[in-house]
């Protein structure tokens, strides 16, 4: 089944990416004050981390799905 193999490959790739970059930040812009056309904005950075157990789980599940997709293809 080609779809199962592709989903497994994508999940394994995301797992590898999570191992390579376990920390990332997102930036959010908030309006602090607005008076007429004038607005004061603040940028807030929020750090996020991906636990190694989650990235390892994604990698293992992706490999299992790829194997299952290839085994389905042979039968």
Image (cartoon, helix red, strand yellow):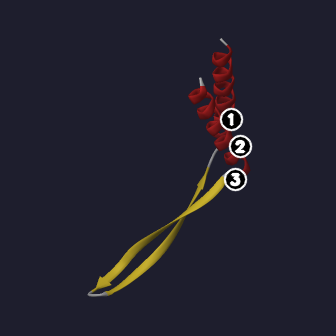
Q: Nearer the viewer, residue 29 or 65?
A: 65
Q: Quadrant of residue 72?
A: top right
- Quadrant showing the C terminus: top right
Q: Which mark is residue 16?
A: 2
Would you name the residue on which mark 1 appears? Answer: 59
Q: Which mark is residue 9?
A: none
Indicate whether 73 appears above or below 60: above
Residue depicted at 34% across the width and 81% down the height? 33
Is residue 45 toward the left or the right of residue 19 in the image?
A: left
Is residue 72 toward the left or the right of residue 41 in the image?
A: right
Residue that extends furthest to the top in the rendered view of this protein: 75
Percent coordinates x, y for residue 23 in the rendering: 65, 55
Q: Earlier in the sequence, mark 2 or mark 3?
A: 2
Label 2 crowding class (10 Å Cα cut-off): few <14, some 14-19, many 20+? some
In the structure shown, which secondary structural element does the residue marked by tag 3 occupy?
loop
Percent coordinates x, y for residue 30 in the rendering: 41, 72
Indicate whether 59 appears above or below 67: below
Residue depicted at 65% across the width and 18% down the height? 73
The residues tagged by marks 1 and 2 sit, at their Cα atoms, a distance apart of 7 Å
The residues tagged by marks 3 and 1 sit, at their Cα atoms, a distance apart of 14 Å
Residue depicted at 69% across the width and 53% down the height? 21
Residue that extends furthest to the left in the rendered view of this protein: 36
Q: Quadrant of residue 64?
A: top right
Label 1 crowding class (10 Å Cα cut-off): few <14, some 14-19, many 20+? many
Q: Earlier in the sequence, mark 3 or mark 1?
A: 3
CB atoms of marks 1 and 2 within 8 Å? yes
Q: Nearer the viewer, residue 6 or 65?
A: 6
Q: Nearer the viewer, residue 64 or 28?
A: 64
Is residue 23 toward the left or the right of residue 37 in the image?
A: right
Label 3 crowding class (10 Å Cα cut-off): few <14, some 14-19, many 20+? few
Would you name the residue on which mark 3 appears? Answer: 21
């Amino acid at each position: 089944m080609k779809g199962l193999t592709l989903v497994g490959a994508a999940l394994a790739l995301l797992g590898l990416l999570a191992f390579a970059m376990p920390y990332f930040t997102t930036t959010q812009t908030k309006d602090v004050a607005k008076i007429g056309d004038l607005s004061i904005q603040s940028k807030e950075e929020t750090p996020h981390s991906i636990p190694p157990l989650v990235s390892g789980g994604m990698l293992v599940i992706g490999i299992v799905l790829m194997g299952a997709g290839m085994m389905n293809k042979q039968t």
